[in-house]
Image: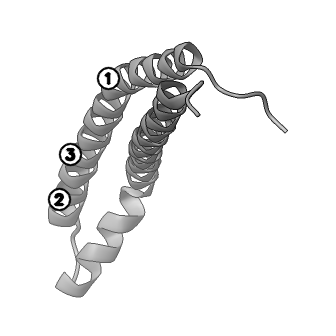
């Protein structure tokens, strides 16, 4: 069984989580910016390859997909990194809410301690 919590420990945990959330804002923003850049590069390259293909119209899309596969992979990797950072940020927010709830319980416990 774990030891009883004290208000100082809980407040320190809340502060640590809040700091991690604050630092995570830049991580999520940077990951999203990287995704947007990769998406923009892929879209441009796809459009150029589509228009440059000399052949029937129904082949243009497939030719463009073949030519831009590497850029699409890069875009997908950036998308996955952004989504991971976003989920991690949301998980930290949930952890903060949980610790705030624990804090309320601990404060209640300490406020009635010694009363009979």
From what the image shows, is residue 86 above or below residue 4? below
- Whole-percent x, y for residue 104 in the image: 43, 35
* SS for dot 1: helix
The residue at which mark 3 appears reads as 40
In-image side of 85 versus 40 (left or right): right
Q: Quadrant of residue 32?
A: top left
Element at label 2? helix
Q: Is residue 2 left or right of residue 33?
A: right
What label sits on residue 26 in the rendered view? 1
Rendered residue at 18%/83% (across/down): 57
Residue 29 position, x and y percent, is 28, 31
Q: Mark 2 or mark 1: which comes first in sequence?
A: 1
Distance of label 3 from label 1 (alpha carbons): 21 Å
Front in this rendered view, residue 59 or 68: 68
Residue 40 position in % (x across, y down) = 20, 45
Which residue is painted at 21% across and 70% down in the image?
54
Quadrant in which residue 69 is drawn: bottom left
Return the disc, 3 or 2, that comes first in the chain's sequence.
Answer: 3
Query: Which residue matches tag 2?
Result: 47
Of labels 3 and 1, the one closer to you: 1
Residue at the image position 18 percent from the left and 49 percent from the top: 44
């Amino acid at each position: 069984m774990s030891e009883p919590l004290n208000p100082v420990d809980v407040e320190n945990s809340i502060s640590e989580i809040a700091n991690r959330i604050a630092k995570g804002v830049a991580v999520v923003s940077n990951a999203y910016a990287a995704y947007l850049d990769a998406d923009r590069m892929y879209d441009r390259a796809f459009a150029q390859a589509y228009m440059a293909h000399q052949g029937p119209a129904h082949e243009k899309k497939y030719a463009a997909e073949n030519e831009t596969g590497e850029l699409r992979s890069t875009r997908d990797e950036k998308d996955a990194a952004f989504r991971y950072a976003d989920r991690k940020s949301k998980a930290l927010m949930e952890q903060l809410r949980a610790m705030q709830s624990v804090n309320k319980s601990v404060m209640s416990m300490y406020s009635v301690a010694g009363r009979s």
